[in-house]
């Protein structure tokens, strides 16, 4: 349960940082960390429901995950895709740093491929 919670917080943090930089660009607004954590959870559910489909599952899962970001944040498909890519990059950096200090058993729940 602790690994799940930490992984969800890492995924939420990655989405939060990405959304702040891609969508709001420093403008004050309602892009809270809690909103990002819920987005990460919903994105993980979308990925789990769609990625098992044979042949195109990974593509469907990725589109579903980006659709969750598009639904939860303002902007269109392009901003959602860029936010997703930035969240993935942020999650990879955080996970690499955690691996360096010996905490390699966590992941970034809600960020596919991280």
Image (cartoon, helix red, strand yellow):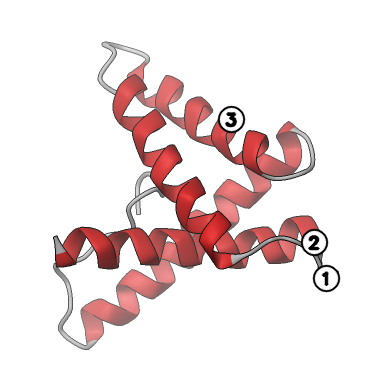
Which quadrant would the C terminus be assigned to in this image?
bottom left
Q: Are marks 2 and 1 in contact (CB under 8 Å)?
A: yes
Q: Are marks 3 and 1 in contact (CB under 8 Å)?
A: no
Give the SS element for disc 3: helix
In this orientation, which residue lies closer to the viewer: 46 or 30? Answer: 30
> Quadrant of the rendered structure where residue 50 is?
top left
Percent position of residue 102, x then y: 15, 84
Residue placed under numbered mark 1 in the picture: 28
Position of residue 34 measured from the top left corner of the image (x, y, whole percent)? 52, 62
Circle 3 sits on which residue? Answer: 67
Q: Are marks 2 and 3 in contact (CB under 8 Å)?
A: no
Circle 1 Cα neighbour tier, 10 Å, few/some/many (<14 / 14–19 / ≥20): few
Element type at marker 1?
loop
Q: Quadrant of the N terminus?
A: bottom left
Relative to residue 36, is residue 95 depicted above or below? below
- Tell me the number on the disc at residue 102: none
In whole angstroms, how far apart are the C-alphas of marks 2 and 1?
7 Å
For image coordinates 17% across by 78% down, the residue present is 103
Q: Residue furthest right?
A: 27
In the rendered view, does 19 fall on the left or right side of 61?
A: right
The residue where tag 2 is placed is 24
């Amino acid at each position: 349960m602790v690994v799940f919670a930490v992984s969800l917080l890492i995924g939420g943090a990655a989405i939060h940082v990405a959304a702040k930089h891609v969508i709001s660009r420093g403008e004050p607004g309602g892009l809270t960390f809690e909103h990002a954590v819920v987005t990460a959870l919903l994105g993980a559910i979308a990925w789990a429901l769609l990625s098992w489909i044979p042949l195109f599952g990974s593509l469907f899962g990725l589109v579903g995950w980006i659709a969750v970001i598009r639904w939860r944040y303002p902007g269109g498909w392009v901003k959602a895709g860029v936010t997703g890519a930035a969240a993935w990059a942020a999650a990879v950096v955080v996970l690499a740093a955690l691996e360096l200090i010996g905490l390699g058993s966590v992941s970034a729940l809600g960020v596919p491929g991280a």
